[in-house]
Image (cartoon, rainbow, N blue to C red):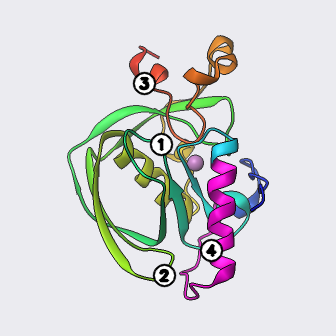
Amino acid sequence: MALRNVLLEGDGTLRKKSREVTHFDQRTRELIDDMFETMREEDGLGLAAPQVGVLKRIFVMEGVEDNEPTAFINPVLIDEKGEQTGAEGCLSLPGLFGIVTRPEEIRVRAQDISGEEFERTYTGLEARCVCHEIDHLYGVLYRDKAEGGLHKLEPEEEQDETETASEEIISAKVADSDA
Ligand code: NI
């Protein structure tokens, strides 16, 4: 496993559309392992392949509520219900957050590392995370959807690691504040 470099906003790769994965091979497995390692190193809750410069339809998610580490290959939203409005961040836009409205509940269909298809339903923060990561696969950043633009995280929030799950997705603290 190896850490990969996370691309920052401004890099054109983040604005490109990712391609369908057709080979469920060792290379795909290594990419996913590296994505998990990179996401953990950066304290993210999710990470999409284009963020590490690979234009493939893959994202990983972990650490939202009781979620187990999961890799989603060729993910598609097949249902969504309701609405939630809250704070979001992204490892590709460090130190920032914005208020984004997402579905409250989603159902996602994807393939696992063996190519097996699975479906899961998520609510709340996990639903928000899945929507955010799938957007990355279409070259969409949460800045495009943030109401009232992006804001800087307060310095004390940036310093306190336990409070800044704000990178790649959301800080519960920010979400609970009146920011
Ligand atoms: Ni992101």
Q: How dense is the environment of label 3, judged by Cα within 10 Å: few (below 14), some, or many (20 and up)?
A: some
**Distance from Cα at disc 3 to Cα at disc 2:** 36 Å
Q: Secondary structure at mark 2?
A: loop
The residue most toward the bottom is: 22
Label 4 is placed on what type of residue? Arg
| Residue 34 x %, y % | 69, 61
**x 26%, y 44%: residue:** 104
**x 53%, y 58%: residue:** 60
Mark 3 lies on residue: 175
Q: Is residue 15 magenta?
A: yes
Single out the mark in the foreground, 3 or 2: 2
Mark 4 lies on residue: 29
Q: Secondary structure at mark 1?
A: loop
| Residue 151 x %, y % | 59, 25
**Badge 3 or badge 4: first in the primary sequence:** 4
Single out the mark in the foreground, 3 or 4: 4
